[in-house]
Image (tube, grey):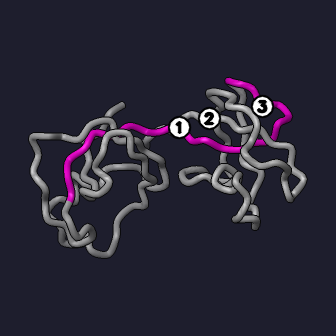
Amino acid sequence: MTTVTLVGTRLAEAGAEFVYRGEASGCADCPYRDQCLNLTTGNRYRITNVRQSGQTLDCAMHDTGVRAVEVEPAPIQANVPSKGAYAGSKASLMGPCPHTECPSHPYCEPAGAEFDEEYRISEITGDPPHDYCMLDRDLTLVELEAPEDG
């Protein structure tokens, strides 16, 4: 489902993805609060369209202002345990990993997903980008369905 919201002009490009972090301190007295603070905190979104008819609005948090865009919940690329991982099954993330230099780290701790939640796998992508897991985890790279807005 598509939702119209406001994002910083630097992010306002079709295909860009972001995780909505909620209200910031500068939002308190903003006249555009209702148009901007209308997403689910912690969810990942993809911009599907930038409203060309809209103007750039001043914003206390974005130095170049904000633009109206259409967004939809975005799927999440993640590493999950290989055992039982198939399209349609549910999976959880393995937990934190201290090896931030690993090429799989962004998939083991993906933005927009929580460790204590279960997600439905929409697609098996394949092997993770690492040669070996430093925590000796047997992982598969998958696409998790976008969490529902709510």
Amino acid carrying mark 2 in the image = Glu
Q: Which residue is drawn at 68% across and 24% down?
A: 88
Magenta highlight on residue 71: yes
**Number of callouts in the render?**
3
Query: Which region shows up in magenta?
Result: 66-87
Estimate how packed mark 2 is, as few (under 14), some (14 to 19) or many (20 or more) residues with alpha carbons within 10 Å: many
Does residue 96 appear to the left or right of 47 in the view shown? right
Q: Residue at x 32, y 54 (%)?
A: 11
Rounded to the nearest angstrom, the CA distance separating label 1 from label 3 is 16 Å
- Residue 125 coordinates in the image, percent (x, y): 67, 31
Quick one: SS at disc 3?
loop
Q: Which of 134 and 111 is in front in this view?
A: 134
Residue, disc 1: 75
Residue, disc 3: 85
Does residue 36 appear to the left or right of 99 in the view shown? left
Does residue 6 appear to the left or right of 92 in the view shown? left
Q: Which of marks 1 and 3 is nearer the N terminus?
A: 1
